[in-house]
Amino acid sequence: MEMFMKITGTIEFPDPKSRKSAAKILQALSPDNLRSMESEIRDDKVAVRFHSEKIGSLLATVDDFLMNVKIGEGIEEAMEKEDKTREN
């Protein structure tokens, strides 16, 4: 008899500024969401839940997600910097 384990993890963005940024990025990334992840975006909470039967798969999914978030943050920062330059 083969036993299966369900491994879950959650990433939450508690800081109001990071929540706002994370919500934008999550909305942009949502078309790429896998069946093994769900996101929750509310005014008071932004979170992503991951689940898998294999730890390697879970870690790979989280790693890909975090890389996409990092890229999204970089784009957001560049756009804010460009907006400030245009204002001056």
Image: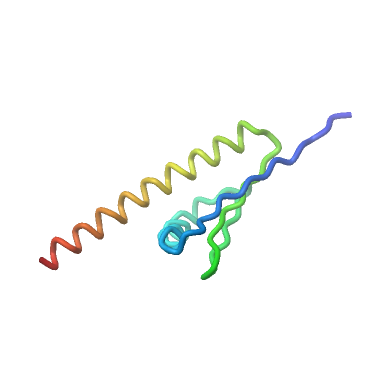
Residue drawn at x 70%, y 40% is 7
| Residue 47: image location, x then y, percent | 56, 57
User: Residue at the bottom extreme?
Assistant: 43
Residue at the extreme top: 1
Question: Which residue lies at the image location 61% right of the left edge and 35% below the top edge?
Answer: 57
Quarter of the image with the N terminus is: top right
Q: Dividing the picture into quarters, in which one does residue 82 lie?
A: bottom left
What residue is rendered at 55% in x and 54% in y? 12
Q: How is the image coloured?
A: rainbow
* Above or below, comparing residue 45 to residue 51 in the picture: below
From this viewpoint, which residue is outermost toward the front? Answer: 15
Task: State whether residue 4 is above or below residue 76.
Answer: above
Q: Where is residue 80 in the image (x, y as percent from the top left)?
A: 25, 60
Task: Locate residue 39, reporting x and y percent.
Answer: 57, 57
- Count how many numbered circles sit on residues in the image: 0
* Quarter of the image with the C terminus in it: bottom left
Question: Residue placed farthest to the left in the image?
Answer: 88
In this view, the residue in front, 30 or 44, is 44
Horizontal relation, residue 41 to residue 16: left or right: right
Q: Position of residue 29 (x, y in %)?
A: 46, 54
In the visual, does 34 lie left or right of 83?
right
